[in-house]
Image: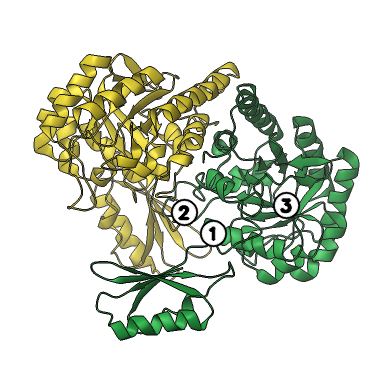
Amino acid sequence: MLIIMRTSATKADVENVVARVKSFDLDAHLSDGAERTVIGVVGDGRPVEKSLFIRLPGVDNIVPISKSYKLASREFYPKNSLVPIGENRVGNGSAIIIGGPCAVENREQLLEAAQAVKDAGAHALRGGAYKPRTSPYSFQGMGEDGLKLLAEARDLTGLPIVTEIISPELVPLVADYADVLQIGARNMQNYSLLKAAGLTQRTILLKRGMSATISDFLMAAEYILSKGNQNVILCERGIRTFETATRNTTDINAIPVLKSLTHLPVMLDPSHSTGDWRFVSSLARSGIAAGADGLVIEVHPDPANALSDGAQSLKPKRFAELVNQVNIIANAMKAANITALPEG
Amino acid sequence: MMIIMKTSASQEELENVLASVKGLKLHPHRISGSERNVIGVVGDGRPIEPSNFIRLPGVASVIPISKPYKLASREFYPENTLIPIGDHVVGNGTPTIIGGPCAVESRDQILEVAKAVKEAGAHALRGGAFKPRTSPYSFQGMGEDGLKLLAEARDLTGLPIVTEVTSPDLVPLVADYAEVLQIGARNMQNYALLKAAGQTNRTVLLKRGMSATINDLLMAAEYILAQGNQNVILCERGIRTFETATRNTTDINAIPVLQAQTHLPVILDPSHSTGHWEYVSALARSGIAAGADGIIVEVHPDPACALSDGAQSLKPRRFKRLVKQVNAIANALKAEDISTNPLQ
């Protein structure tokens, strides 16, 4: 951490800050510039609270140097973590595709979607039984009945199940039925939910909050990892910006940035990140080309009558085309020896 | 345009609005809902000003329906427009690659980069002679001397020249030397400059403003087209968001969205949209996979000593690798006959 003193700071101000640093068993390194003094604070790797110094007289600003996440960082684990979804391992260089409806609506809809995504080449089935909807008047999901239908779809197709948890007390129930617990964008900083998910052995699909920075996102992953669950997949799903032409703005930069900062696998959800089915295939291709380990795609047999997210859901035929396109990109990258890791 | 009346609007207020619509020689279509009235305003295609109605008593809001841009819209011209850069054509399905330094710094520097980008497979050379820098104390460019060096680099390599115009009075001078006039993000809404560029017959590379919506970008293009110059290339270069891990946030959604809305070619600038050289190749691949018609990339023989944008500039060796990767993606899509046009 660097403590930047004001140009007007007195010698006594500087000495006071140095004394404070030493009182926490930290070392202070002074650099006297032409205009001002900067104090480097060196510790033993434990996080140093900037609030301990920011209010001292003469202090202008504090710049953290160390990253505040540890277990999630690539410095901690330099290889790519391989995270299981059923028999597949996410992060091993193959594009893993999760497809299915936004919400489980009924038996017929789910089984039809499950069979269709299986036939198209998906590796897992998504579908929400508990839905965190913006409006309390919107369809809130089928609850445990939906989980039972998901289990039936798994029996039918062999596809592992990805479904959302929205509350800590539901975690054991959902973990009984599902292979992967999804934590949605609205719950990315629901810390009691993150801790509950960290206490299970299920793979967690953690979606980025719509106004979370990449650093916030990695800190949320750190909550899960610090509870002992190492199976975390990160998912970029678009952020909130001033642009209104699309539902969200896909932060495609986040793919290579995350691949360089963390060993955890990174997926893209182009359905939510665009909000418009016409753009989903373009974005799916671009995500894989940018180095994503996989995709989460909304598929519905009849989008026009979907109870949620109809505008961004693909029909099964379009989804099959998307899978084909994504595989073409992934194969071309493999053939040209292009690794997902950013250069450096 | 739709005029939404307040739930509390009186019959008299409604009739007053209907009369105002008719007074402008437009046709009102009244829709009576259970809670409120909505009036559809139908004209002859000319733009209707919302301000004519928004202040009338009983009006809650006014929603435009028609797009405000005409010449730039795909409805106006459904094919892809092909735009020349020297002998090269942008928009014909093969990715256009423009490479070169942020700024022309010296004869040695520009000639060395020009040869390197030519050898790597670029189709045009970029380099700024007039630089719009955030700080008035930063290097402002070599001016006309820089243009002369760019012309020399063209003579040496045969590469057409892309360089920025920062002021309307400079347009004739820069057009004398360059094939392509670039209008930078900071000048996207410099309307005097847009009009001046529209009066030349040079190809204009128009970059998206850092807080411009896609609609704003198309309106800026409309300024150039309306002056009679049909050769406009749009460029996504990242937008300003809350994320600070990268210099800007690449709005990759803008690629398929623009291609759905306009016939003009769209290219991506992954150097500015990330601000870090480590991420430029991943983003270049993702742009082409999303359907971009090309990329513009900053290349410098010695980025550590560059007078501007050193952090995001690629060394020639890395640029060569980027070109190979981009072509691998483009060729794979072409070989499998995958159209990158957005679905309809």
- In the image, taking residue A16 as reference, residue B84 lies left or right, namely right
Quarter-wise, where is residue A89 in the image? top left
- In the image, taking residue B107 as reference, residue B210 lies left or right, namely left
The amino acid sitting under disc 1 is Asn
Same subunit, labels 1 and 2: the answer reads no
- In the image, taking residue B18 as reference, residue B323 lies left or right, namely right
Mark 3 or mark 1: name the one nearer the start of the chain.
Answer: 3
Secondary structure of the residue carrying numbered label 1:
helix
Quarter-wise, where is residue A292 in the image? top left
Relative image position of residue A165 (x, y in whole percent): 18, 36
Q: Is residue A308 visible?
A: yes
Q: Is residue A77 visible?
A: no
Relative image position of residue B258 (x, y in whole percent): 57, 49
**What residue do we see at 62% from left, 45% from top?**
B269
Chain letter of disc 1 in the image: B
Report if the CB atoms under discs 1 and 2 are less than 8 Å apart: yes
Relative image position of residue A264 (x, y in whole percent): 36, 28
> In the drawing, what numbered circle is on residue A13?
none
Classify mark 1: residues with Cα within 10 Å, few (<14), some (14-19) or many (20+): some
> In the drawing, what numbered circle is on residue B103?
3
Locate the C terminus of chain A by quadrant.
top right
> In the drawing, what numbered circle is on residue B215?
1
Chain letter of disc 2 in the image: A
The amino acid sitting under disc 3 is Ala
- Which residue position holds label 2? A245
* B34 is higher (above) or lower (below) than A298: below
Q: Nearer the viewer, residue B271 or B267?
A: B267
Q: Nearer the viewer, mark 3 or mark 1?
A: 1
| Palette colour of chain A | yellow
| Palette colour of chain B | green
Q: CA distance from mark 3 to mark 1?
A: 30 Å
